[in-house]
Image (spheres, helix red, strand yellow):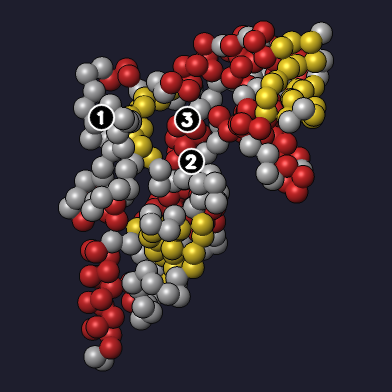
């Protein structure tokens, strides 16, 4: 049965959008489809297990399961560690609203301290075009989010479930990027708590991973030391720090920040995560200066 573009259900329109189709083609064959853009596709139709597209008078197709996979990966991608923050300071009228997750704004003079409230400058919350703060509420037990994406996926859950079940054989569950970020944050916090407990029982932990987010370049800079703050190395986040790209060329999160932090906390012995700040630099500078005079 042939289903034309104007006959697509709302759920199918969400899945088989031009951006997702183009990205699916590119993932299957980057060399062949590197120049294909959404506006190149004149029409879309569904026939059996295939998505058919008309491009410049020719027809190209791919299996629906590839687009479904791409759609799910896009909607459930895990943002960078530095993209969001649990906004404890946010005052809510109803405690049942859930956990507030705030999108962080790195523009302006506040950016370099957006994740360092102990310096004395609070983070800045990203706002939409109407000036509304981008704060979303997650209910962990119910696995729900207040963001438009989750609400939309949940609204068309039955149709989406039918599509995924028929062409991928997998169960569809509404999940958004804020839920993914929060789940990853919970896992990281659990590891941090475990390392802190171990340090408390065994004594001061001299193994540290000091990190800094360069928002201008979208890179995570970090250094490790096995000698605590007494290490005489240059601590300013300039050269000699290891680097990991937080985003790729398309500004899609690479997941490198989560990997670095998890690896440091899971190492034997475990490394404490220390966020680089003016106060940390001051302490290190005093200690290094004192050591150099002896």
Disc 2 from disc 3: Cα separation: 10 Å
Element on which disc 3 rests:
helix
At x 28%, y 26%, the residue is 130
The x, y position of residue 164, in whole percent, is: 70, 19
Element on which disc 2 rests:
loop
Residue highlighted by disc 3: 179
Are the two marked residues, 2 and 1, in contact with CB atoms closer than 8 angstroms?
A: no
Count how many numbered circles sit on residues in the image: 3
Badge nearest the viewer, 2 or 3: 2
At x 77%, y 23%, the residue is 52
- Left or right placement of residue 31 versus residue 210 in this view: right
Residue highlighted by disc 2: 79
The x, y position of residue 38, in whole percent, is: 62, 32
Residue highlighted by disc 1: 131
Q: Can residue 27 be seen in this view?
A: no
Classed neighbour count for the residue bearing mark 1: other residues with Cα under 10 Å, few (<14), some (14–19), many (≥20):
few
Q: In this view, does 113 lie above or below 84?
A: below
Q: Tell me which label, 2 or 1, sits earlier in the chain.
A: 2
Q: Which residue lies furthest to the bottom in this view?
A: 294
Are the two marked residues, 3 and 1, in contact with CB atoms closer than 8 angstroms?
A: no
Q: Is residue 283 above or below residue 291?
A: above
Q: Is residue 44 visible?
A: yes
The x, y position of residue 203, in whole percent, is: 37, 63
At x 19%, y 50%, the residue is 121
Q: Residue furthest front?
A: 57
Disc 2 from disc 1: Cα separation: 22 Å
Classed neighbour count for the residue bearing mark 3: other residues with Cα under 10 Å, few (<14), some (14–19), many (≥20):
many
Residue 70 or 2: which is nearer the viewer? 2
Q: Is residue 101 above or below residue 268?
A: above
């Amino acid at each position: 049965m042939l289903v034309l573009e104007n006959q697509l259900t709302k759920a199918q329109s969400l899945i088989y959008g031009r951006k997702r189709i183009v990205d699916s083609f590119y993932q299957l064959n980057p060399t062949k489809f590197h120049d294909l853009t959404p506006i190149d596709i004149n029409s879309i139709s569904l026939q059996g297990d295939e998505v058919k597209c008309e491009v410049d008078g020719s027809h190209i197709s791919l299996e629906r399961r590839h687009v479904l996979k791409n759609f799910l990966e896009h909607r459930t991608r895990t943002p960078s560690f530095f993209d969001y923050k649990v906004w404890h300071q946010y005052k809510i009228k109803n405690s049942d609203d859930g956990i507030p997750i705030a999108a962080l704004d790195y523009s302006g003079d506040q950016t370099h301290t957006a994740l360092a409230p102990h310096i004395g400058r609070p983070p800045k919350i990203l706002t939409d075009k109407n000036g509304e703060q981008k704060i979303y509420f997650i209910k962990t037990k119910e696995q729900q989010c207040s963001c438009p994406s989750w609400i939309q996926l949940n609204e068309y859950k039955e149709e989406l479930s039918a599509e995924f079940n028929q062409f991928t054989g997998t169960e569809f569950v509404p999940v958004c990027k804020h839920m993914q970020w929060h789940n990853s944050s919970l896992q990281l916090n659990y590891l941090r708590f475990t390392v802190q407990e171990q340090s408390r029982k065994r004594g001061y932990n001299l193994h540290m991973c000091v990190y800094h987010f360069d928002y201008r370049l979208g890179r995570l800079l970090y250094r490790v030391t096995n000698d605590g703050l007494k290490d005489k190395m240059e601590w300013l986040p300039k050269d000699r720090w290891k680097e990991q790209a937080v985003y790729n060329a398309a500004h899609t999160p690479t997941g490198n920040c989560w990997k670095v932090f998890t690896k440091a906390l899971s190492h034997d012995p475990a490394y404490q995560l220390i966020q680089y700040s003016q106060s940390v630099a001051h302490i290190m500078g005093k200690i290094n200066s004192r050591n150099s005079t002896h």
